[in-house]
Amino acid sequence: MPYNPLVELGGLQNLAKRWAGALGARGYDVQIFTVGRSGSHGPAAMRTEPERDFRAALIARIEGRQSPNRQGLDPYTLYEVMQKHLVPGVSVAVIKGFDIHWVKGFGTADVETGRPVVATTLFQAASISKPVTAMIVLRAVQDGLMSLDADICILNYYDADGRMGLHQDKDEGAESIAAGVPVVSVSLGDTARFLFGGLKRRDPVEAIPLESGDAFVFGGPARLRYHGVSRILPATAPPALHLSGRFNLTLRQF
């Protein structure tokens, strides 16, 4: 897997801050809760004996062997599955009634130092961010802040030497741009090194790897941010696609 700078962004917490900032600019009242830190919204307190018993039983069920065996790995404990697949550490969080019910770490966060995984250990968000992004987009559609009725789809193909310089997407109608109607970019094939800058060409630029299947959405205040592609990483497409190079579908509303 190519290097992903999102790992350095502090995992879900920094991603949540970015989403919160973007949504706040669109009129949403957004609050961020951090698990297990002093003065923050941690796991819900177990106030009664039945609640404590339920929590203990749920943790034991997740840690233990599963029955019946539906996926081939159910006869193994959580630690045995980790050992089988050479996974040094994981964390589990359970949400109940829109509250953090409990959080627990398993294994080590750093194999060199032996630092254990705890409730505040940060992991790469990876595909966890996709359903969260989908929920945010659909909520914005529901509230009338954006529409999914794109009427333009541009298909670009990048070979191994393909590039695209920093630019703004300003070809749509003035009303669409002023409303911040988002641009949706979908990647298929080889991984692209996507550049995302600011509203001025000389603003700092962030490099983000966009892998096959990734969707990148920018709208609202970010609608006119400069962006481009600095390189394509050959032979990184999923083998099942039988593709070389990158296809990019850009959906817009004129």
Image (cartoon, grey):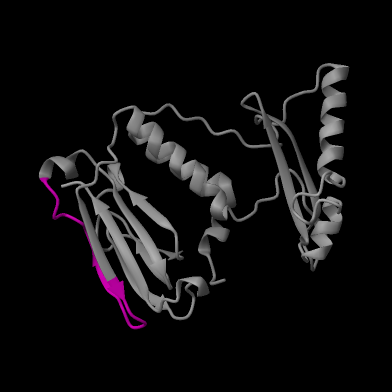
Q: Residue reaching furthest bottom?
A: 161
Q: Position of residue 169 (x, y in %)?
A: 20, 56
User: Residue at 79% of width from left, 55% of height from top?
Assistant: 73
Is residue 172 on the magenta stretch?
yes
- Looking at this view, is 230 or 243 the one in front? 243
Magenta range:
157-173
Total numbered labels placed on residues in the image: 0
Q: Is residue 206 left or right of residue 155?
A: right
Q: Residue reaching furthest left?
A: 174
Q: Is residue 70 left or right of residue 129?
A: right
Q: Position of residue 14 (x, y in %)?
A: 53, 47
Q: Is residue 160 left or right of residue 181?
A: right
Q: Residue reaching furthest top?
A: 48
Question: Looking at the picture, does residue 97 appear above or below residue 104?
Answer: above
Question: Looking at the picture, does residue 143 appear above or below residue 169?
Answer: above
Q: Position of residue 243 (x, y in %)?
A: 41, 76
